[in-house]
Amino acid sequence: MSFRRALALAACGLAGGSALFSAVAVSKQPARGDAEPRPGGSAARPAGGGGGFWDSNWDRREPLALINLKKKNEETGEEELSSRLEHCRARATRHIFLIRHSQYNLDGRADKDRTLTPLGREQAELTGHRLASLGLKFNQIIHSSMTRATETTEIISKHLPGVKKISTDLLREGAPIEPDPPVSHWKPEAVQYYEDGARIEAAFRNFIHRADVKQEEDSYEIFVCHANVIRYIVCRALQFPPEGWLRMSLNNGSITHLVIRPNGRVALRTLGDTGFMPPDKITRT
């Protein structure tokens, strides 16, 4: 039994390239809602990149975590607790569609010059047609304020008339966290991880969570942004090591579908789907 009580050292990558070492008991599952934010932006996890443990309070919206148990009445406490838990419990499912922008002009020096290529505009048309064909009642389109994402959104929205569009700087492209394993062809300065990582983590916390308790119907939301942002969000939502984001590849105009249940469980239905595009229209630039 001694090995089950042994301590394992977990090396957690930090923005800026440093490391944090923490000791956790191998045999003990972390208490519900106890995971604290890591300096690198993501929640602390057991040794071994998660250890199979699911933090049910990952979005800080677990009903039990929203109630001050110290104020529970001793005589009718159980009834009051049940009533208060029900009041804090989400009822709707959120469907998150993460769309990578279409192919763009790589030669542009400034963001305003990095407009979509003719092929990129075709890809956006195909993506918009695909989303419309799903027959879903989309609630909104939130998109990165960068030119290539904005242009992709404008084309997609033509296929989804009446769906409101919201621009945000939080979803702009960047370097979320130093990847593991590292790659030789892409090595941003440590300060870029420090600055971009905080912003992209803020995007995750702001947009990716279970439905509000006041939401009565399931929602279908589109986010048009960038490959690095989408890959990081997928890792965080599934509670995979966020440093593994660069192990995935996404095509231009691809669709990634996340489902967030009322109980906080998250499922990945599709990752980078471009099966609706002819092979000669698929790119990853």
Image: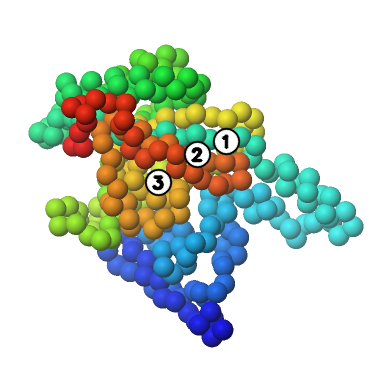
- Structural crowding at the residue carrying mark 3, measured as other residues with C-alpha within 10 Å and reported as few (<14), some (14–19) or many (≥20): many
Q: How many angstroms separate mark 1 from mark 3 (CA)? A: 17 Å
Quadrant of the image containing the C terminus: top left
Measured along the vertical axis of the image, is residue 130 above or below residue 251? above
Dot placed on the residue nearer the N-terminal end, 2 or 3: 3
- Structural crowding at the residue carrying mark 2, measured as other residues with C-alpha within 10 Å and reported as few (<14), some (14–19) or many (≥20): many
Measured along the vertical axis of the image, is residue 234 above or below residue 163? below
Q: Is residue 117 visible in this depiction of the protein?
A: yes
Q: How many angstroms separate mark 2 from mark 3 (CA)? A: 11 Å
**Left or right of 157: which side holds 2?**
right
Q: Quadrant of residue 161?
A: top left
Measured along the vertical axis of the image, is residue 93 above or below residue 125? below
The secondary element bearing badge 2 is classed as: strand
Q: How many angstroms separate mark 2 from mark 1 (CA)? A: 7 Å
Dot placed on the residue nearer the N-terminal end, 2 or 1: 1
* Residue 35: mark: none
- Structural crowding at the residue carrying mark 1, measured as other residues with C-alpha within 10 Å and reported as few (<14), some (14–19) or many (≥20): many
Q: Position of residue 281 (x, y in %)?
A: 20, 26
Measured along the vertical axis of the image, is residue 250 above or below residue 70? above
Residue drawn at 18 percent across, 30 percent down: 104
Q: Which residue is mark 1?
A: 93
* Residue positioned most to the left: 107
Residue drawn at 35 percent across, 48 percent down: 232
Q: Position of residue 20 (x, y in %)?
A: 37, 70
Q: Which residue is mark 3?
A: 234
